[in-house]
Structures are given as C-alpha cells and as structure tokens.
Image (tube, rainbow, N blue to C red):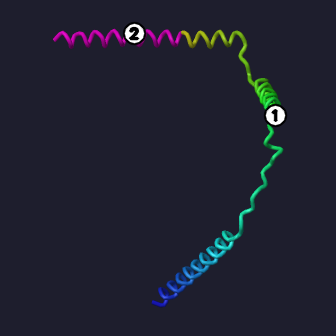
Amino acid sequence: MRQIFVHSNSVLRMWKSMAEATKEAGKVVKKEAKEPAKKEAPRKEAAKVNRIEELKKFFNGTKSELKKVHWPDRQQVITYTSVVLVTVALMSVLIWVADLGLSALLQLLVKK
C-alpha cells in the first residue's frame, strides 16, 4: 500500500509542476502579446522596378540552365521518335479493333 501512495504522490507532484509550467508559459505569452508590433517604413526606392533588367536576368538564368541540359544526338531523336510513332500506331489499331468488336456486339443486341 505504501508503494501506491508514493507513486500517487510523485504523479501529483508531476501534475503540479506541469500546471505551474503552463501558468508561467501563459504569463510569458501574455507579456509578449502586450508589446507593440514594430512597423516597417515603406520603401520608396523599391517601388521602382526596372522590368528590362529583370527580363535580362531571367533570360540569362534560362540560358545557363539550358546549357546544363543533356540534349540527345540525332540518332537518339530518331530512335525515340520511331518508338513513339510505333506505339501510337499499335494503340490506334488496338482501339480500332475494340471499337469494331463492341460495335458488332451492340448490333447483335439491338437486332434482337
């Protein structure tokens, strides 16, 4: 029984310390909330933006990024293009055959 009492006392002390910490944290938050917020002065110089300089900077950045791109050579372009064209042709034939089959099935159902 003594062990349960000791354990419950330690739990109570823990809860009290947590409650005190929460109260102190609340006080700190309340103190910080009372301080006035500092307002920044509007920048008059930043209002004027040189659009031409921004465009030059943008295009220079784009140019430098395009230099980093690995461009395929002529043979790779031909190979990849033919793969795409063959795949599109096969899929077109597959869809055409499915369409013919479904059309024939629908005609059989409508005739009856």
Q: In the image, is 37 to the left or to the right of 106?
A: right
Marks 2 and 1, how far apart in space?
A: 57 Å
Q: Which residue position is annotated with label 1?
A: 50
Q: Is residue 69 above or below residue 105?
A: below
Question: Identity of the amino acid at label 2?
Answer: Trp
Q: Position of residue 38 (x, y in %)?
A: 75, 62
Q: Secondary structure at mark 2?
A: helix
Q: Hey, what amino acid is under mark 1?
A: Asn
Magenta stretch, overall SS: helix
The magenta span reads 86-112
| Residue 47 covered by magenta stretch | no
Give whichever of 44, 82 is nearer the camera. 44
**Residue pictured at 56% horizontal, 82% vertical:** 16
Of mark 2 and mark 1, the one earlier in the sequence is 1
Q: Secondary structure at mark 1?
A: loop
Give coordinates of residue 72: x percent, y percent.
Answer: 71, 16
Say left or right for 65 vs 7.
right
Q: Which mark is residue 40?
A: none
**The quadrant where residue 100 appears:** top left
For residue 102, side relative to residue 29 (left or right): left
Q: Circle 2 is placed at which residue position?
A: 96
